[in-house]
Amino acid sequence: MSLHHKSDRKSKTADSTAQDLGSLPLQELNEKLETTAEGLSATEASQRLTHYGPNELKDESINPVLKFLTYFWGPIPWMIEIAAILSAAVRHWDDFAIIMTLLIFNAIVGFWEEFQADNAIAALKESLALNARVKRDRKWVSVPARELVPGDVIRIRLGDIVPADACLMEGDPVEVDQSALTGESLPVTRNTEETVYSGSIIKQGEIDALVYGTGINTYFGRTARLVGTTETTSHFQKAVLKIGDFLIVIAITLVALILLVALFRGDSFTTTLQFALVLTVAAIPVAMPTVLSVTMAVGARILARGQTIVSRLASIEELAGMDVLCSDKTGTLTQNKLTLGDPFLMEGISQDQLLLAAALASRAEDQDSIDQAVLAGCQHLEQLDDYQVAHFQPFDPVHKRTEALIHRPDHSDWKVSKGAPQTILALVSNPEQIRDQVEAAIDQFAARGFRSLGVAETGADHEWRFLGVLPLYDPPREDSRSTLETAQQMGCAVKMVTGDQLAIGREIASQLDIGSNIIDAKIFEEASYTDSARMDQLIEDADGFAQVYPEHKYHIVDVLQKHGHIVGMTGDGVNDAPALKKADCGIAVSGATDAARAAADIVLLSPGLSVVIDAIQEARKIFQRMNSYAIYRIAETIRVLLFMTLSILVFDFYPVTAVMIVLLALLNDGAILSIAYDNVRYSDQPEQWNMRQVLGIASMLGLAGVVASFGLFYLGERVYHLDYPTIQSLIYLKLSVAGQLTIFATRTRGPFWSIVPSKILIGAVICSQSIATLVSVYGILMAPIGWERAGLVWIYAIAWFLVNDRLKLMAYRIFDHHQLRRSV
């Protein structure tokens, strides 16, 4: 009976069955799963997918209704709810209705924006989903890992994250890192008929395996609750949260002062408490977390359109501040399109003989760039089909070569190998006799920018003999030179990192005008402890590094970070993962292994360095939007709270009512979310959090706003002799209009007209201030002021806005002298 015809089992039974299957010998497992070494047909796989379900772990979803209700629970919602209860207690039903509207509106906006952000992040994660090489209909194909089913035959190789629980088939042992699952700190060796678990990483080797457990029925699935992930908080998020705490402390302090003075004067306790609570709600940056998440999510979507996937949203800020980028050469600065040059041949060896051996030591289905270049250069060799590969050993960083056991048409055996020339030389019996001429050929190739590939074969005596050297040329990308110039202009130094020889590194660096100071990474191994300071300075001053090993990358990042740099590192291999983790912004380049992508903060889907530069530019725009919001939010809190406090303490006058404060918060916080979509220009230097500058500019704008508010109060009371309710309406409209205009000043470092605001921001402000104007003109929930007085308030607010914009420019000149490094 076929598996897809069997009745569905309960998950507990399926879980038990999966564990039992893992202990079966390979032959019995094949019989149990009704499969063979040739794998499944596409039809059978589809039917099994229906039966077993996708090979994935479903995230625990929260009921949307319960999620929505969480927005009514917490310190800030509690304050709003207490204010509503007090309004009902004193029968201020208008206040009660508006406060409840504010509460529900904040919940709806917060829920919707977080829902949108979560969807954006989920979409980005989906684009990073693993693929697996699987044999279907007797052909190797690449499919999403979620479509694997028990009975599939998969191929796992160096750098892969194992996509499902599987039993290893015939082949060489592989080294597996399963520390994330079992806690073992060192890789373990797994042989034929042994099990590898979903989520572990192949550190060395290549082998086929038979899938027996998928989804929840994997070792990882059974222990998923024990495997936790931690979200790191970036410097910028910490800074924004500190601003929030700062504003809350100011708000509570001033409101407490108002409360004490009002009670001392004998004012109604209930009314005063209600007013104090509402004022606190208006002053506390309720929208700050929402603005932060929305801005980051919108930025991540924009980056995704540019083929840059953000796997950790907080890394956007690190990208904005990055001032050193350690860039891979191959595939990033170069095209990663290797072509063969004219080879160096040992005496008595023909070019076809050399190419045949190199081609047989390559495997097309691995899609390795060197293998593809060799096979492309050997297409004219018709005799390739006459040979059968009995065994293939893939390349790995330890052995640095491939090897194949070949069956000739006459049924005799023959071995071929290709790899690093020095490694191939070590195989042969006469290395010292031929070393000089081989190294001379390698040096000649390197001086022209060619990588060298040694090729050897066994003779009739089964001894290895060196056949020659294949030169491989990987030309620089056409846009690399201009991209590097742009990076330098943006204050981001690019240091080339390559595993190739020093001569190759210098040649490519010369072509790209990177600089001539390319260091051979071998000096790191030869340096003593007393030389550490000198080595650190060499790394700081270097334009690039050659013959780099993964541990060197980690050391380079560590030294640069200790020198105060925000460091980005690109990588593609499993051994690059530690350096990618260590870097402030780890970047997995196009075509990176699963392990590298899992370790990185940023994943590039298209080749080249230009996408990194585009991502830096976009990250700096995101940073500026958040910086603008921070200045705006601090300035508004100072403006409203200080004006209210001084009015009550000095003049014993409440310049606005509780309902007006609620309306201010309701309209302004809703509109300010649109700053996430605003037009900005990216800075030509790495962004850094300068709290001195932010607080200084915000304080100047806030104090200017207090002066402007008292100016209007003076005009209304002493010049036009208006009654207090009308003055309150005038001040409400002024605070609303002036507050929204402030964002147009804070969003630019130059004059407000230097960058045209986005249509979304303009539309949001026009909409919110139209409502505020209509409410004050017709006296909805307040005394009416009419169109004439409303027009005068607008003219007054715009005039002060022009003054504030000049004050902002002055503030930048005062506070921008010292560009401090991040203080958080």
Image (cartoon, rainbow, N blue to C red):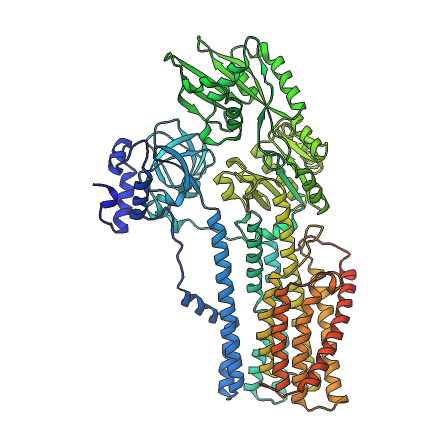
State whether residue 556 is above or below residue 349. below
Of the 4 image quadrants, the one containing the C terminus is bottom right
Residue at image point 42% right, 14% down: 414
What percent of the width, then of the height, locates residue 474?
A: 61, 29
State whether residue 55 is above or below residue 272. above
Of the 4 image quadrants, the one containing the N terminus is top left
What percent of the width, then of the height, locates residue 263?
A: 60, 86
Residue 653 visible somewhere in the drawing: no
What percent of the width, then of the height, locates residue 334?
A: 62, 34
Occupied quadrant, residue 339: top right
- The front one of 415 and 238 is 415
Horizontal relation, residue 14 to residue 140: left or right:
left
State whether residue 400 is above or below residue 33. above
Horizontal relation, residue 23 to residue 144: left or right:
left
Residue 445 visible somewhere in the drawing: yes
Hey, which residue is sitting farthest left in the picture? 1
- The front one of 650 and 809 is 809
What percent of the width, then of the height, locates residue 583?
A: 59, 44
State whether residue 359 is above or below residue 710. above
Residue at image point 35% right, 37% down: 166
Occupied quadrant, residue 641: bottom right
Q: So how many labels did they put on this image?
A: 0
